[in-house]
Image (tube, rainbow, N blue to C red):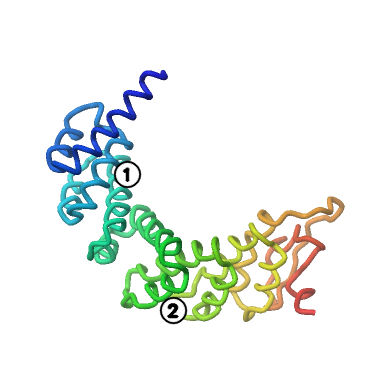
Amino acid sequence: MRGRGVISVAVVLLADWWARLDPTGAFEWIQRERMGMTPAVTTAVVRAWAGRDPEEAARAIEGIANRELHRTSVDALVRGWNDSGRPGLTAYLVALPRGIERQRAISLVARSKVHREGVEETFRWAEALPDDPDGFKLNVFRRVASWAAEVDPQRAAAWAERHGQGEYGKGLYRRVGTRWARQDGLAAMTWLATLPAGPRRDVGVEDLPELVGHPRKDLEPVPTPLTSGKTHDGCLLKIPGALTLETLRG
């Protein structure tokens, strides 16, 4: 087993080196040789090729029939294209068919931008995208909110407030709230309590019980009404101190 691992690493390193010199030849090799038909080797070749010529790499991976390897290739292409700084990546994301591959690709770019360029620059990138009818910009907003909340929940919360009731605001409260709750459940609940009452705010609290937990074992779950007048069965239970939006509002 140990020897196989050494061989696998060697093949990946060879594929990466080869793709930087002759990406077309390396790609053709991984298509016909069994040892090249693995996610790790495919990733090495496509990512290296994307750093050199992303448009050509994008055309090449369209012919990959294996679903897993195609998904891996799209991820590798996006990573390599994003690392290269070459133009055209956003247009490529827009052109991807709706579905999990596009969602994953958007998430990869959003995460990279948040960590490399900062949350404010990433917010500006998302806001500058043209309006679209197929949900691309909404998906970008959601994933930007998620990754921004991982590193700076206060700024992510402020951004979600700016857009939460707008065309691209659906799901922002929930994404920020759940990520923030993993770091500080009380702060997340306190923030949610300040938001305008309504379905978008109410949905934001649904995942908090699972994330925050509750130190008191003697409390029985009961439906808890929100300030909007709606009831979500137990969605506000297990919050520290039996907090609800009403008690936080005082």
Q: In the rendered image, which quarter contains the N terminus?
A: top left
Q: Residue at x 22, y 40 (%)?
A: 65
Q: Which one is closest to the eye, mark 2 or mark 1?
A: 1
Q: Amino acid at mark 1?
A: Thr
Please state the horizontal and vertical placement of residue 168, each as a whole percent of the image: 44, 75
Q: In the rendered image, which quarter contains the C terminus?
A: bottom right
Q: Residue at x 84, y 50 (%)?
A: 217
Choose between 162 and 109: the one closer to the eye.
109
Asked where in the image residue 176 lies, by quadrant, the reply is bottom right
- Distance in Å between CA atoms under marks 2 and 1: 32 Å
Please state the horizontal and vertical placement of residue 241, each as a whole percent of the image: 82, 63
Q: For numbered disc 1, what is the local secondary structure?
A: helix
The mark found on residue 232 in the picture is: none
Residue carrying label 2: 167
Please state the horizontal and vertical placement of residue 145, each as a whole percent of the image: 49, 67
Please state the horizontal and vertical placement of residue 89, each as a whole percent of the image: 26, 62
Q: Residue furthest right?
A: 218
Q: Residue at x 79, y 74 (%)?
A: 247
Asked where in the image residue 227 lies, by quadrant, the reply is bottom right
Mark 1 closeness class: few <14, some 14–19, many ≥20 residues within 10 Å: some
For the image shown, how many numbered marks are present on the structure? 2
Q: Amino acid at mark 2?
A: Glu
Mark 2 closeness class: few <14, some 14–19, many ≥20 residues within 10 Å: few
Choose between 82 and 145: the one closer to the eye.
82
Q: Is residue 54 above or below residue 171?
A: above
Left or right side of 89 for 141: right
Q: For numbered disc 2, what is the local secondary structure?
A: loop
The mark found on residue 72 in the picture is: 1
Q: Residue at x 31, y 74 (%)?
A: 132
